[in-house]
Image: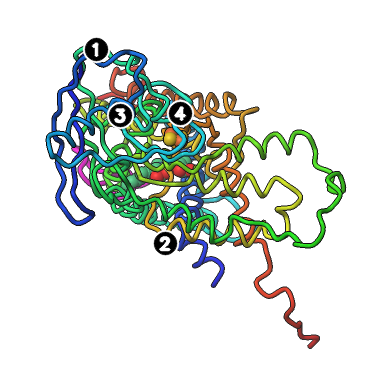
Amino acid sequence: MNFILSIWRQASPEAKGKMVKYKMSNVSEETSLLEMLDMLNEKLTLKDEEPVAFDSDCREGICGSCSLVVNGRAHGPGKLTTSCQVFMRSFTDGQTIHLEPYRSAALPVIKDLVVDRTSLDRIIQSGGYISAHSGPKPEPNSVPIGYDELEESMDAAACIGCGACAAACPNGSAMLFTAAKIGHLGLLPQGQPERSSRAKAMVQQMDDEGFGACTNYAECQDACPKGISIKFIGRMNKDFAKAMLCDELDPRGSMDAN
Amino acid sequence: MNKLTQFYGTAVGKKFVVAVTGIMMAGFLVMHMIGNLKAFAGATKLDAYALYLRDIGQDMFGHETVLWIARIGLVVAVVAHIFTIVLLVKQNHKARPVKYHVKKSFVSTFPARMMRVSGLLLLIFIIVHIAQFTFGEWLSTPFEEGKVYSNISHAFGSGWLPWFYVFMMFIVCIHLCHGLWSFFQTLGIDNPDRNKLLRGLAIVVSLVLFIGFSAVPVAFATGLIGVAK
Ligand code: HEM
Ligand code: FES
């Protein structure tokens, strides 16, 4: 198969980037999109040109490193898939394929197709944890968990933190990511002690990082390689509102008797 | 207060304000539409209804008190809704400083993508509408306070004004097709088990509002009802 690639090239975070066209010929349809980029980079290196920088690690759809916007779609054609799991058979021969980095103020481009996703890490650091004792391992069945809660929590835990939700959202919002993390821990008994503080801290951090707000377009859910539902966004909103409006500000304060 | 300002300081808090003020306005629209349909019962009934609005709760709170509370509540809702939207839209623009070369949407609905456009048109409509039927501006015939039926009959009897109203009611319908469902989603009331029901409810209520509101200008424009010219 033959393709014309139109790729975002940007030398550094400050540099002005532009779309650059490359021709690729004789690509087999079993080639993955990232393998084709490897082939392109080999060609570029042999010509003494700067190879295209892009992220990948596992190349089997589980790590969330790969982060391409392919022809206007985060992670490319198809549903429930990551960029590394896109194969050239999903395109037509001779097609122009546009490859762009994620676009969100909170996910700035480092180089070419690589974006800085530490903003997502900072959201997790702000509250995406539970307190567990570090002594001997507890008896696994000592904390009962309902089957439905467990499964629902696991649905949210499937989030690989790739950031495609923010890339797909017209508002550059990472609500699906944050909601998945809050939902994952908030549904489990181990996550209850920090449930309120977690919702408060993570929602605040998301804004501080410069992510947008939600307009309920549901583009994030469609782009999510793990099929995480926007119901978790509703759940996060509820948790957050409860933490902010219903929890006492000063539970240990004193009250006057006269 | 501290809690509230902190809450409003976040995107999620602002969304709550948009959703709650939105549903307040939508609730008002349902009442308003039911009231308007009194036009089909004739001049006496409609004018009496307009007087009745001023009398609600009169025995307990005094003349027009409840009406004014409702009016103030609505103005606050409209202002808070729009003010908050402006803040959110600003935040959203800042969050996507560089646009995609290939820009596509996959699942977002047309009404959802039109929220800002339909909302802006609604704002214009609200101003025109209040100027016309509350203050009597921009009408071709003299406006007589309290003579609701004859006022609207003259306004809608001919020309393009009734069709402007019908168009604007279509915009209301578009705004609420997404807005009403959005309310449930934003407040975390929606769930996979009731998603179809709530999506459907939003569309049905929006259509009922469109048809119910449009019926009055259409009936006057086509001469089905109205005062003799
Ligand atoms: C009759 C008047 C109006 C009603 C009944 C109404 C109702 C609603 C409702 C129920 C929502 C959904 C809230 C949510 O996201 O959960 C909404 C959202 C919205 N409204 Fe309105 N609205 C009205 C007027 C306006 C006006 C005048 C504007 C703009 C100037 C506006 C702009 C918007 C926008 C942009 C959204 C989307 C918010 C977002 O999620 O980002 N609306 N409206
Ligand atoms: S490289 Fe690991 S998910 Fe794509």
The segment highlighted magenta reads B133-145
Q: Nearer the viewer, mark 2 or mark 1?
A: 1
Magenta highlight on residue A201:
no
Disc 1 vs disc 4: Cβ atoms closer than 8 Å? no
> Does B41 sit above or below residue A194?
above
Q: Position of residue B169 (x, y in %)?
A: 35, 30
Disc 3 residue type?
Val
Eye-nearest disc, 1 or 3: 1
The number of discs equals 4
Q: Give the CA distance from mark 1 to mark 3.
A: 18 Å
First in sequence: mark 2 vs mark 1? 1
The residue to which callout 4 is attached is B206
Label 4 vs label 2: CA separation? 36 Å
> Which residue is disc 2 drawn over?
A208
Residue positioned 54% across, 43% down in the render: A233
Q: Which residue is mark 1?
A: A1
- In the rendered structure, the answer to whether residue A22 lies left or right of residue B215 reads left
Q: Earlier in the sequence, mark 1 or mark 3?
A: 1
Identified at 29% across, 25% down, the residue is A36
For disc 1, the chain is A
Q: Is residue B72 left or right of residue B218?
A: right
Q: Amino acid at mark 1?
A: Met
- Chain letter of the residue carrying label 2: A
Q: CA distance from mark 4 to mark 3?
A: 36 Å
